[in-house]
Structure formats: structure tokens, C-alpha cells
Image: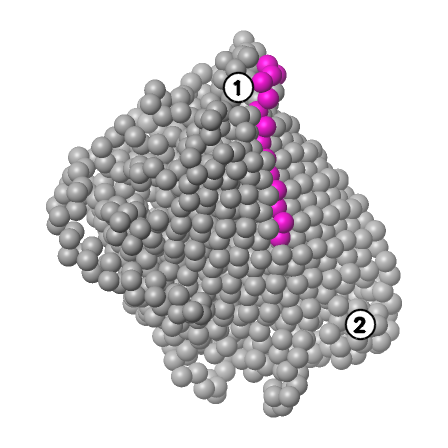
Amino acid sequence: MTFRKKRAFHFGGASWLLLCAMADGAQAQTTPPSSTQLPEITVTAPSPIVRRKPVPSRTPARVARAAPGQNRERAAEPQPALVAAAPQQGVLPVVTDQFATVTVVPNEEIRRQGTAQLGDLLFSKPGITGSSFAPGASSRPVIRGLDVNRVGIIENGTNAGGASDLGEDHFVPVDPLATNQVEVIRGPAAMRYGSTSIGGVVSATNNRIPDALPTCAAAPFQTYGLPAKAPLASAGPPSCVTVETRTAVSSVDRGVDGGILLDAGGGNFAVHADAYGRKSSDYSIPGYPYLFDQTRPVNGRQPNSAMQADGASIGGSYIFSGGFIGAAITQNDTLYRIPGIDGADHQTRIDARQTKFTAKGEYRPDAAAIDAVRFWAGATDYKHNEIGLADPTDLSTLGVRQTFTNKEQEGRVEVQMTPFNARFAAVTTAFGLQAGHQELTAPSPDDPTSPLNGLFDPNKNNRVAGYVFNEFKFTDSTKAQIAGRIEHVSLSGTTPAFIPELFDLNVDPAAIGPATPRNLNFTPKSASIGLIQDLPGQLVASITAQYVERAPKPAELFSRGGHDATGTFDIGNPNLGIETAKTIEIGLRKATGPFRFEATAYYTKFNGFIYRRLTGNTCEDVACVSPADPAAPLELNQAIYSQRDATFRGGEFQSQLDIGPLNGGIWGIENQFDVVRATFSDGTNVPRIPPVRVGGGLFWRDSNWLTRINLLHAFAQNDIAPIGETPTAGYNLLKAEVSYRTKLDPTWFGAREMTVGLVGNNLLNENIRNSVSYTKDQVLMPGIGVRAFANLKF
């Protein structure tokens, strides 16, 4: 049976189950809730300090503190075993125990949204959007107007790898089909992952390296759909195997996707395996995509926007009384097309492959001073070929036009000390050491011997860092944090003797010399301080201040060639210095009760903000390259990496209000708002900044059903850069969804739990252009579409 047939079988069964579930909805065994039961939010990425929680009398804590001289066994996740009703879907997750806003996308929401890229998954979250270079195939998260070199992406604690930070047309090699939870970390906690995370960190987690044994015992719904964990008894629990299938079809792109996840355990060993695949055609659009060229046939679909992807992973862990250690190997493959005029004319596509090895572990020694020792390690081998026609009129010229490779290794070790009483506060300290090596290549597709030798080929990046986080618990309601980080970055590469200032003067190209090797070293330093204060009415307030230095990235230093993704000829500047960001952020949050909300305001002052500066010239106007390589495309806009002071300020708000009971469930309203304003020191606008957005909607839910309708309005973006950027029209994005979740009799196909549903997107079928996308004037977001999904647990 082919993979496609398997997916069709799963969805056919899911459709039948959905009809049965709707027919039996009145007979579902649910307890009409008198108030919303809020699931506990467990975040894994924000801080190296893991706070211990009290151990319930009937449910052991995941990492329980043992009495001196006793073994510490890895125990189960806290389960809602003492309540009658299961936690409901669609509850707004608000994290109140962190020093800055953490956006959490739980498992059940990921399953409902079903996107292929993290940027698409987070597109409508307050303060976040996606780059949307190729919707559904290539979209990287943009946080508060910051992207690529200021937003980190990690999976299970290690760098996601790939080349998405080197070009907006490159995909993010983390597929939501195999992801259980996504967290967006802002503020001081992002320093844990490096200075290139000024904007924030997007952390995806899954069970590819198990940290506990699975259990097959029937239990209430787990928090956010996370699999249940069982304590490791001295004799070892019985063997157990659980399976989950995730399938969906979508109308807008005639897409189909499916995945299967397997977890098994016995004795001291736990293993995990998963495999997934997705395929879609050119997606439907509501109007004509090309703003400035009305002569091309389109036929109702975005030309050259199809994609397909697949992946698989296998991992295992050894779990012992003091912790665990495990490893996994993952393969990601994708082939997707690049929409836009040039992409359609040249049939441009990217064929990418990534092999990634990861390992992590935790040890809790029976010692008075050390609470836990944790480590993460990863190695990535990534390569993609950019394929297209050299001559649009000659189909025989199809071939590889550019190749990118990324070989990267990294490791991180953290030691969390046992809290001690410093009289004025209980102090918890965690130390960390991080190191990594990266080698990037992008050789010239036409002449590897050229003095330019590709976009930025080759370059190496070595980095080592140490950091410390200190938390002070003054009282149960007042906590503070002081953290610092110092790192050393060594970069080596070659760059032509470009003199960026000369390009603005339109000088003789003979002034440009040959390529020369460069070895650059930077020592960025960062620090932060934060305060959390519990207030009356279950409110939590926070204020943080941070100072972060960032070393330039290789692309900013060594670029020297055409970059089709951005339509620019990029000229790196080896004279760039350290970028500095000084931020203050205040927040007010409430996670319990019928009204839940979070509000955040921030102000960031950049000294030496590094950006790709368009000169207003094309390669026809001035010399983009040296005389040794005169064949640069004339249509490319000349761009030089430069530094200027800049200011970012803005805020985000989202809330959810349970109004009251209705037909055995709860109905209510929800809303959101976000704004970011970014200007240079002379008052001109930083390019590609998201617009002001405001949204709201209605919901109804009970222990089984969730229904929602939500409208997000984005205002027109007219605050644009003076060169090379066009205004973006506003839009209304209407979404609606209905889903049903229930327990099943395991004798019925062996499934013990089912979630099925329908999701409608862009129901007004509006022309939507994303202001942060380089291709917004040529690429529309998908039109009206419906997605049907089914998830079964066995």
C-alpha cells in the first residue's frame, strides 16, 4: 500500500467517525461544567531554572525532591486525577511564572491548525507573524518585527539547523505534524540560547527523546494533549506501546497530510518512532497576485506554489532513578516551489534534505548542593539545491542554480544548584556552558573558480559561551531574577575588497579589488534583571530590563552575490561591529478565573542595528561585482549590509472571557491586539514591519466540543522604508472551527481516544498580502479553504 493510500484510508475512517460522533453527541458522557477547568501549563524552554512544584497527595510530581539519602525517582507528570471533568480545549494558555511573556501553542491547537511551517502556525498570535515567502512551504516566525538573525528556532533544546536564517525562501526544518508543543520565549530567558535571539526564541518540543516511560493505563485527558508518563518503580512497569495517527485533507491546496507516532517502553528503556508526509498542489487565491504586472495567466491559483515533504525519526532513552539519557536521529526531506514572477517563469523549486542527530539527558545526584545536571547536544547535516530554468524559453535548461549546505554541531550543559536560604531570599542558581561550530557553503552555480565564489562561500563560525541565572524568592508572591551571559564568536570567510561607500557614488568598478580572507572575532556580553509580583485578584505583574550584544552573522559580513529570494545583490560588510539592544518590558497577566488575559508593552533601543540597506540602484546602474565576474543579473537591487541606530516599541494584548453556561457548556468572547513601531534615528521607517492588528470572536466549548469563530483585522501598512518598499493594504481574516474529542472503547479498532474537526480559513476570501514578505506584491495568501482532520490514539 502506498503512503498516499494509507492517508486516504485514515481520513475515510476519520470522516465516518466524525459522523458517528455527531450523531451520538447528545449521549456523550460529559459533566456540564459550572466553570472553565483550566489545564496546567507546563513550559519547557524559558529558563535553565526549573522550579519544583508541590507533590499532590495522589499524584507524584515529575521531578520530586527526595529526602537526603533517598533515591530520586523520575515520576509522572501532574495529572488532573482529582477532578471530575477533563480540561477543555481552546482555553487561552497564560504563563504567569516567567519574567516575560511566553506564548504557548499546545498540542490540541497544533492539531487543529495543521500548518506545515512554524511561521504559518504562529501567524495570528499577538506580536508574532510569519515571513510567508512561500505560504505553506517556507515561512519563518517574525517576532515584534524582528526575524532571521534575531529570532532563534530550536527543537528539543538544540538548534533546528537548516538555512532558514540565510534566506527567506528557505524552509524551517521543524514540521508541526511531529510537534507536541510550541513555545515562543521573549525577554531575558532568550539569552540562554545566544545573542542571536534578541527578538525571541521559538521552541518546538516532541517526544523523540523520551524523558519518561509511557503508560497504557486509561487516564483523563492530559494537559494540552501531552502523553501520560508513569513513575519508574523499582521492579519496572510492564511493557507498553502507544500509537497515535494524525491525518488531514485541505481544500484550498488539495492537500493531504498524515503522520504516525509510536511510543513504547519496558523496564528502564523507552523508545519513540514517528513518520510523516504531506503533499499539496498550487493553492487557490481570491484575486490576481501580481500587483505590477497584469499580463500573466493565473487561472485562480498561485502559480508555482505546490510542495511535498516527508520525514521520520527514531530515538530512545535509558531511564534510571536519578534521571535519563537518550538520543534520536531525524531525517527531513522537502521539495517545494517558489511562487512569484521569477519563480513561476523559471519553475524555481528547492529540494532540501536534513539529517540531524540529537541527544539530551538529566541527572539528579543525591547531593546537598547540586539539584540537577542537564545536557543537550546536536549535529546537523543540511543541503538544498535551488533548481530552475536558466532560460525560461528552453525547458532543457532545467538544472541546479544554487546549492546551500550547513554542517553544524553544538552542545550545552547546565547545572542547577539546590536553593539555599540567603536570609533575605531563597536563592536558586543555574550555570550553563554552550559551544558550537558551523560551516556554511553557497558556491557559485556558474563558476566555482570565480573570485566571488558564491553568495558567501565558504565561511566558518565558532562560538563558546557561559551564562548564569539567579532567581531570588523573597516571598511566595515576590521573585526576582538576575542573569548574565558572555560569549566569544570567531568567524572566518572571504570577501571581495568591496568599499560599500563607493557604491553610492557610482564609481568605476575597477575600484573593486579581489577576494581576500578575513578572520573576525567578537565577544558579546549580555545581562538582565527582572521582577515578578503577585497582585490582588490573581493578577501577576512583571518588569524586566535587559542589555544584549549581538555579533554579526556570516551572511551580514561575507555576502557578495545575487540573492533571488530578496531580489537583491547582497554586499556584506566585514567592518560591521557588535549590535546592542537595550530593552525594558512590563507585563500584567491573569491565568485563572473566567477572565484570563495577558498584556505587554516594550521599548527597545538598538545601537548599531544591522540591516540590509537598499541603495536605490540596480546592477544596471552601478557595478555590483568585480570586473572578473561581470554577469550579474541587471534586475537585482543593490543592497549593502549597514548599521544604524533604531528604536522598536510596541505592545500586545489578548484575553478570553467565559460569559456563562450554555447547553451544558460555556460560551464566551476573546480578543487580541498588537502593534509594533520601528524607526531609525533620523525618523525613517525600518523596512518590513507588521501592521497594527486587532481581532476578536466567540467560542463555545464543553469537555468534548469546541466551536470558535474569529475575525482578525490588519490595518494598512503605510509606514514603509523610503527605498525599495511599497505600502500594503489592510485585510480581514475570518476563521471558524468545530472539533470533537472523546474517549473510545479500545475494542473499537483499538483506538482509545479520538479528535476530529473542521477548520475554515479566510472565509471572506480576501486578498491578503503580508507586509513583512519580500514577495508580497507577487504572492497572495491562500483564499477560502476548509481543512478536515482526525487524530486517533491507540
Q: Nearer the viewer, residue 10 or 689?
A: 10
Label 2 SS: loop
Q: Nearer the viewer, residue 489 or 27?
A: 27
The quadrant in which the N terminus is found is: bottom left
Residue 357 colored magenta?
Answer: yes
At horizontal 19% and vertical 58% (from top left) the residue drawn is: 20
Residue 49, percent from left and from top: 54, 28
- Residue ID for mark 2: 448
Neighbor class of circle 1 (other Cα within 10 Å; few <14, some 14-19, many 20+) is: some
At horizontal 30% and vertical 66% (from top left) the residue drawn is: 12
At horizontal 56% and vertical 36% (from top left) the residue drawn is: 318
Q: Nearer the viewer, residue 702 or 127?
A: 702
Outermost residue to the bottom: 393
- Is residue 80 left or right of 690 when viewed as pictured? left
- Residue ID for mark 1: 71
Residue 460 colored magenta?
Answer: no
Q: Nearer the viewer, residue 57 or 631?
A: 57
Residue 504, percent from left and from top: 74, 67
Q: What's the magenta region?
A: 356-369
Tell us which disc is closer to us: 1 or 2. 1
